[in-house]
Amino acid sequence: MSAHYDYSGRQVLVTGGAQGIGRAIVEGFAKSGARVLIADLNVELAQALAAELLGKGFEAQALEVDLADRAAIFAMLERLEQLDVLVHNAGYFPLVPLAEIDEAVLERTLAVNLSALFWLTQAALPLFARRGGGSILVTSSVTGPRVAYPGLTHYAAAKAGVNGFIRNAALELARHGLRVNGVEPGMIRTPAMDNLGDAAHSERIAAAVPLGRLGLPEEIASAMLFLASDAASYVTGQTLVVDGGATLPETLVAL
């Protein structure tokens, strides 16, 4: 997956990096030579992944952070001496009908998915300045910017905001040598799929995808590795849809 990219000498921070898509992103950058910081609320899981990667000769470190806590985000970044790539991958999306969304659910959904992106970027700007630029990447979603899913109105609104951030931040930060891009995953086979239903439900979703299957976390990681690389040096303010063609049909009848 990562053979075409060389991130030797670069440091990469991945939020929500302990499992699922985040884990694949961490592994992809580590195998490409980067030193990877795994920022996660589940520090035990992050430490286990870091130990596994270190045992294989890669560079990795676990960091504990609650991305709903602005002060914790700044404290984490202030401890760093170097940053070349920032990947905000962490997400929060409990399945809750619109009529039942309460203040706590809405606030944490917006905080983790959207607000944290502002604070991570602000806190990282001095680190990027030391390096003369860098790359900011975000795991967005097709849900919100392109399609809808019952029970995810709070998440859809947050991810639509993420895409707005990507475009506007890319414009503002270009003069500082920073590129800002994102990936919009479709349905990816991860533990988070359990939020949406049982295994039978997942298989029904997979059958409706034009490519006939759910995506793999490694396929999102590959898109991230490209967007952060010199091969994408003239790409900024963009999101790359990786969904197996799920958003292509005008109606389900087309399938």
Image (tube, rainbow, N blue to C red):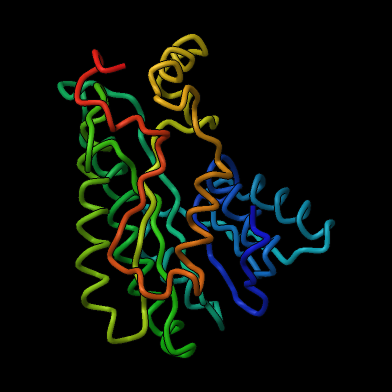
8 or 122, which lies in front? 8
89 or 145, which lies in front? 145
Q: Residue furthest left?
A: 99
143 w.r.t. 78: above or below: above
181 w.r.t. 132: above or below: above
231 or 119, which lies in front? 231
Q: Number of callouts in the render?
A: 0
2 or 182, which lies in front? 2
Would residue 120 appear left or right of 48 to someone viewing this image?
left
Q: Quadrant of residue 2?
A: bottom right
Residue 99, image x and y in percent? Answer: 15, 21
Q: Residue at x 66, y 54 (%)?
A: 27
Q: Quadrant of residue 211?
A: top left
Would residue 47 appear left or right of 74 to someone viewing this image?
right
Q: Residue at x 56, y 83 (%)?
A: 81
Q: Residue at x 33, y 25 (%)?
A: 95
In this orientation, does residue 32 appear?
yes
Residue 132, image x and y in percent? Answer: 44, 89
Residue 66, image x and y in percent? Answer: 45, 53
Would residue 71 appear left or right of 58 to someone viewing this image?
left
Residue 28, image x and y in percent? Answer: 63, 56
Q: Residue at x 38, y 40 (%)?
A: 92
